[in-house]
Image (cartoon, rainbow, N blue to C red):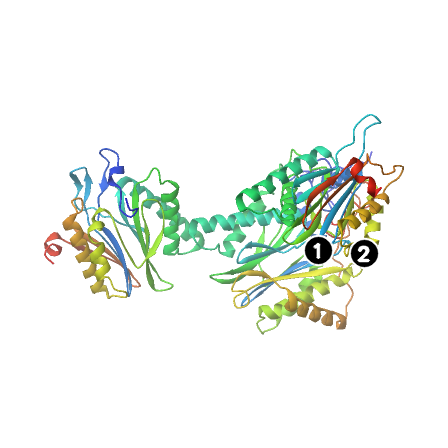
Amino acid sequence: MTSIGTGYDLSNSVFSPDGRNFQVEYAVKAVENGATSIGIKCSDGVVFAVEKLITSKLLVPRKNVKIQTIDRHVGCVYSGIIPDGRYLVNKGREEASSFKSLYSRPIPVPSLADRMGQYVEAHTLYNSVRPFGVTAIFGGIDSDGPHLYMLEPSGTYWGYKGAATGKGRQTAKAELEKILDKDTELTTSEAIKQAAKVIYMAHEDNKDKEFELEISWCSIEGTKGLHKFVTGEQLEEAIEFAKSETSVADFNDSDDDDEDAENNDANVSSDDEAVDRDGDINIE
Amino acid sequence: MNGIQVDINHLKKGEVSLGTSIMAVTFKDGVILGADSRTTTGAYIANRVTDKLTRVHDKIWCCRSGSAADTQAVADIVQYHLDLYTSTYGTPSTETAASIFKTICYENKDGLSAGIIVAGFDDKTNKGEVFSIPLGGSVHKQDYAIAGSGSAFIYGYCDKNYKNDMSKDETVNFMKHSLSQAIKWDGSSGGVIRMVILTKEGVERLVFYPDEYENL
Amino acid sequence: MFRNNYDGDTVTFSPTGRLFQVEYALEAIKQGSVTVGLRSKNHAVLVALKRNADELSSYQKKIIKCDSHMGLSLAGLAPDARVLSNYLRQQCNYSQLVYNRKLSVEKAGHLLSDKAQRNTQSYGGRPYGVGLLIIGYDNSGAHLLEFQPSGNTLELYGAAIGARSQGSKTYLERVLDEFIQVETADELIKIGVESLRQSLKDETLTVDNLSIAVVGKDMPFTMYDGENVSTYL
């Protein structure tokens, strides 16, 4: 890594001579090691899914929920430093609520994306803060229909038909492209199953670890535009589908996306368990 | 005080008042705002051809009653908000405009004397809407609204004669009669009757002189 | 000398995206004495090993009550735990005042997470140096949370933090199926104490150094110290 030792990567908000902000790039590294999150946009809504690694058998199943609701009509999932994501969602909620209290209508999703983007960007401007260690995928339904965005630690956000981030993003993206390239429009109820499949496939490279699947959706018909979790039979069905699809699929050589953490940055505690390098920070 | 009328005693000594008769009525093709044109400082008529119908957005207008200074200032602020809103989110709804009026009127209720009726035409739904925001800063969505000191005299008349989905001519006529009575019985209302008609076609202004409306 | 340049503050990411100051804060937990938490369907229990500075000094308090339905034990910097438990007490009080409702354990966890997160993203402060085990009983039953200075809070059936806590954790994993079925608080406490023993080195459990707390169905948060723990030794 050329950035190390130059001194330009030690503080946020500092440009290197070639115009880069290394602290932001390092924040992206925190995301790239996080659990896989995805989002799919359909004609009638959006679907979110995330891989929840089971790092201990003492964890209570189906608790420790990761997907969050920003406003009644907007959902959010993220990879990276989870507490940062929670903080970002809290900010998003504040924006959504202040919009509603002034204008008496729900915030349009593109405006929410803009405000959250500005907030994240502001964290790249000052050396008194660090950038957000998350990439967030969020979206929902407003008066203009469904929207899906992915927001990066730099504050950049793009609209997506299918978005993926976290450790398994490469595999997930490839799968999403296959799903979304088809001519037939995907419906949300179909996308729930596909989302489950994508997470299962993205997990293949990480097979030794157990995981739980979490899915949520906003659908014009299915949830009346509100953001809701997929539960019960619907979830079981999606998992069944994902399992049956992944067991038959043949896997070509694994695409190496984890630029394995080179350990040339000084030593730290030769330690026992400080951080789960592969999962989210400190989930034991 | 019943909360609907404007408390004119609240004004400072010498403050210019819109002791007023205003109303806004939804009808088949949209909404019509109407007002008298008298502005007073105590017993003196400071302006006999005032325009109390104020634009805050292309097809969202308001009728102002209470302090002239306060309501002009509030309308200016709302206009600013709606301009900003338009450039970031597109055309605002009448409800959104009413909500901004409300926020300002409510949060400054101790300092303002403003009784406002917000009326607008929504090009998406093709419907006129009326929101009344009386003194305390509450919001009331209504088919039609009347306010100002003169309104006290026409509650009965309006209740008896208003009909849903009237034609434009019917509505203008209804309002002309209503305001004429308000002006007749209220000492601080008078001058001409002004109207603004908001429909799909756009904005249309009408003026009626005393000769015409006094002998209906 | 090989020096780590990326561990000086909480606002600097390492080139691999790690926050060393936060990781070091996690190490602070291991400096504290061990505490174990576990729960069944109807009860949640905390068991902790108290330390004293020397023979003549008193023992450091390990368990703090927050409300009649909630309390916590700590490992790491006790002053930080006081700040956090005072905050939780305030929030419990606020919930009662404003919503006329007991603060849910899940919400308590989120509040702590969000508070701790702030200390990891801005310059001039440090992350909290304490780990907490929070137990409580609310509308959705008995709960146990593990709070970390990183801002992560996890809901678990059993947890152990502090010095040599791995022994307790391994034990809990082994008897997991057994203790989640347990009916009485008494049995659960016994398993908790046994689990705590797995992390002991030179110490032996006495009436002076063992602290126990329990909360559950029809049972407000209760702490046992001194002679009251003798039956569990």
Q: Secondary structure at mark 2?
A: helix
Q: Is residue C41 left or right of residue B64?
A: right
C24 or B2, nearer to the observer:
B2
List x then y, in percent, for residue B92: 39, 55
List x then y, in percent, for residue A147: 54, 60
List x then y, in percent, for residue A209: 78, 58
Question: What label sits on residue C178 in the rendered view?
Answer: 2
Q: Answer yes or no: is residue C120 visible.
A: no
Query: Which residue matches tag 1?
Result: A35
x 22%, y 48%: residue: B51
Q: Residues within 10 Å of mark 2 (few under 14, many from 20)?
A: few
x 36%, y 46%: residue: B137
Q: Residues within 10 Å of mark 1 (few under 14, many from 20)?
A: many
Extreme-right residue of the structure: C202
Q: Secondary structure at mark 1?
A: loop
| Chain letter behind tag 2 | C
For the residues marked 2 and 1, what is the alpha-carbon distance in whole angstroms? 31 Å
Question: What label sits on residue B34 in the rendered view?
Answer: none
Q: Is residue C203 left or right of residue C161?
A: right
In the rendered image, the vertical position of residue C107 relative to residue A45, given as above or below: above
Q: Is residue C33 left or right of residue C141?
A: right
Q: Is residue A246 left or right of residue A127?
A: right
Which of the 4 image quadrants contains residue C94? top right
| Chain letter behind tag 1 | A
Which of the 4 image quadrants contains residue A185? bottom right
x 55%, y 57%: residue: A74
Amino acid marked by disc 2: Glu
Amino acid marked by disc 1: Ala
